Amino acid sequence: MKLATWNINSIRARTDRLVAWMTAEQPDVLCLQETKVEDSGFPGDVLRGLGYEVATFGQRSYNGVAIVSKLPLVDVTRGFGDGEPDDEARVIAATAGDLRVVNVYVPNGQDLASEKFPYKLAWYHRLRLYLDRHATPESSLVVCGDMNVTADDRDVWSPEKWAGQIHCSPAERAALAEVVAFGLVDLFRKHTPEGGVYSWWDYRGVSFFKNQGLRIDHILATRTVAERCTSCTIDRNARKGKDPSDHAPVIATI
């Protein structure tokens, strides 16, 4: 199975890009984040025309997640379902084949002094509790998406510049580590232990051309799935050209 995750940063603005990429890469399962559209406006017919099933959890102008799959999507759920407010479209899960796929768009947090920062940390804790309720470390499980955190300094083009900043703070990394401690493996890091490979570059300036990026998009999997993973790469080429997303797809072969 070829499984990919991509923050598309507005699917309506980049439908043609998405279709071209899917046609070339032929992912079996693709998790999308920041679709920025209500379900009624999602270009499902276009993707179904490519041979995919589509499950969406949309929101007008903000957030939004979706799973598209060549395999039937079974037991689709949306949100955490924990009784807490779930007014942001950030979590969708489905079973494709023998794999339970949880697609997340983690809150950005804005900056460490913002009221949105503790919300981000609390959201990560809710994600860990969600996994505890719905899965075990022995499950065939993937948790992927735009996680808005670098796991360590290998994921940062300049650790000195980014030290203590949003995406790189100790508190955020600890929150991500709590989720990983459920029993997950970072599939990209399994195959690429060295740093300097990123999934996001700021639109401003020449960050992309200078490779001044962060790796904040992750595919995490339980060990039984990680053992089956033969590769995990970041498609930097998808960040090139006119009007790209500021993120690149991450692709795992399982």
Image (cartoon, rainbow, N blue to C red):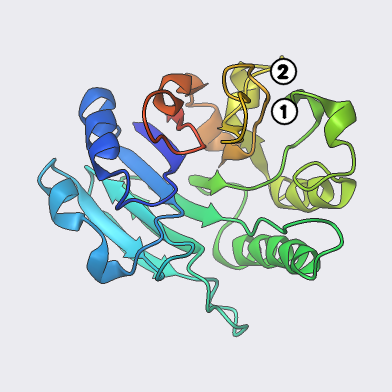
Query: Can you tell which quarter of the image residue 159 is in?
Result: top right
Q: Which of 140 and 205 is in front in this view?
A: 205
Mark 2, Cα crowd under 10 Å, few <14 / some 14-19 / many 20+, is: some
Give the quadrant of the C terminus. Answer: top left
| Disc 1 residue type (three-letter) | Asp
55 w.r.t. 231: above or below: below
Q: In the drawing, does residue 110 fall left or right of residue 99?
A: right
Q: Where is residue 173 in the image (x, y as percent from the top left)?
A: 80, 45
Q: Residue at x 40, y 71 (%)?
A: 60
Q: Which circle's residue, 1 or 2, is located before the other in the chain?
A: 1
Q: What residue type is labelled 2?
A: Gly
What percent of the width, then of the height, locates residue 79? 50, 71
Q: Residue 136 has which mark?
A: none
Query: Which residue lies at the image location 48% right of the left edge and 21% below the top edge?
Result: 236
In the rendered image, the vertical position of residue 26 relative to residue 39, given as above or below: above
Q: Which of 199 and 121 is in front in this view?
A: 199
For disc 1, the neighbor class at 10 Å (few under 14, some 14 to 19, many from 20) is many
Q: What numbered label is drawn on residue 155?
A: 1
| Mark 1 → mark 2, Cα distance in angstroms | 6 Å
Task: Tell me if label 1 and label 2 are in contact, CB under 8 Å.
Answer: yes
Q: In this view, does 19 lie to the left or right of 152?
A: left
